[in-house]
Amino acid sequence: MPDTDLLFMTAARAAALIRSGKLSPVTYMQEVLAAAHAAQPGLNPFVAIMDEPALAGARAAEKAVKDGAKLGPLHGIPVSIKDQVDVDGVVTTHGSAIFADNMPPEDDVTVARLRAAGAVVFAKTRLPEFGHKGLTDGPGFGTTRNPWDPSRTTGGSSGGAGAAVAMGIGPIGLGTDGAGSIRIPAACCGLVGLKPTLGSIPWQQATDAFGNYTYAGPMTRSVTDAALMRAAMVGASDKDPWTLGGGGERGLTPGLIGRDLSGLRIGVIARMANPRVQAEMAEHTIASVDALVAMGADADAAGEGIDWIEMPGRVMYQGNYAVSMARHLGQWSNQMDPSLLAFVERGSKFSMADFRQGQYARTRLFRDIQALFTRFDVLVSPTLSRTALPADFDAAHDEIEIDGEKCGITRQGWSSYVYPFNLTGHPALTIPSGFAADGLPTAVQLIGPWGSDLDLLRLGALLEDARPWADKRPV
């Protein structure tokens, strides 16, 4: 089998071959590690490539196959972990010099569950400092670049995972999403990315577990792989109070089992907080909706009159950074990302009343979205307003530009479609929708009621079949 065929094989296919003895986990891991080292100088996706532990895990996986042991659904599959999530024996730096020596005592619950499903951790992936922005660069490590065009960003904050999975360096990657940080790089790099329902997959890294709007989730090149990865991680954990209620988990809606989508009501949201959208992004979103309509669904415009609370959301986002970073500024400010410092400075100017008003606005937004789901079964939007930004874009000061028009900062002009659902808790899935004239991927986002993650994955699988993308690979 040619190396590229092996690297770009789905996790589902590779796991089946491993279980049948037709693919050696050791050979597989050797190819992935070689690809990781080859890509690192140019794309910079990795904080650490764990050669010896990864090969030891692959050898153990191979022995388990030969011994006839019980094998998990991801047995022998290489997985990368964002450097915001603890892996036993490897530092968790959070993209910052402040935590350069931060050695966790054990695996995060999500990592432990992936290992229990048979996956083998081979690398930690890049993020901007503390995951604060939608690009992946920083003073301590430089820039992580997009495999489709290295002059463009991978997006962020799970940008290292985006670059790695898009290049076939491991079929699955664990990302995190605080304001779109799974979906932004997935959209930039042509991947599937799921922000799950609040409380379905544990997030034990939260400092404020009860006010949490950050999520762990899969980044993959196929919908099936996203579903397999999600299934390995869902379930209650005493480290995340939201999971103790089950996250509203529900099974697949029977009407979505086949290809007849008669009765499915789709609400199409053309704009959120953004003034413009790139023509190709909008066209490919409509083409995706049309593919579902061709299967029997009905579609109508949605979202008119909703306040997408960009400014109240910004108050909470930057205000949280102002509080959490305050203890580090005296010693570390000269080594911190200037854009993070700008966020901290802006956040420090908001009052307690501003912050509480933001929280009230979050509740209003949740109720507005809930009201939409009395009329629609699923909402559809572009994932981003345009393709990947330049790699040197300054997230603190530069404005988004679409068709020659300035559209505000990233939250206003680019990632306006993603952050609202971090605040409301609804599941949101991004999948590729095509390619723009600049050669970069476009993406469409599906949003569902709480607990409808499986429904979104099923609709994503139907779109994957109707408008295939997995045969496209970056050079």
Image: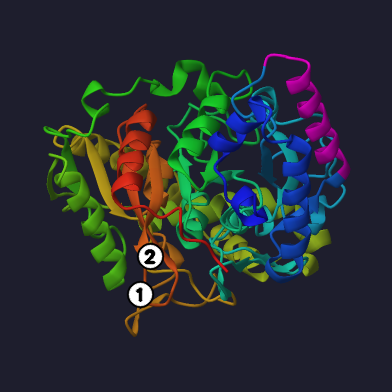
What is the three-letter code of the residue carrying label 2? Gln
Q: Which residues are magenta?
A: 52-70
Asked whether residue 54 is drawn in magenta, I would say yes
Q: Earlier in the sequence, mark 1 or mark 2?
A: 1
> Depth check: 73 or 376 in front?
73
Q: Residue at x 20, y 45 (%)?
A: 292
Badge 1: residue crowd in 10 Å (few <14, some 14–19, many ≥20): many
> Depth check: 92 or 312 in front?
92
What is the three-letter code of the residue carrying label 1? Cys
In the drawing, does residue 125 fall left or right of residue 150?
right
Location of residue 428 in the rendering, given as x and y in whole percent from the top left corner:
38, 42
Secondary-structure class at tag 2: helix
Q: Residue at x 28, y 53 (%)?
A: 381
Disc number placed over residue 412 in the picture, else none: 2
| Location of mark 1 (residue) | 407
Q: Residue at x 70, y 66 (%)?
A: 138
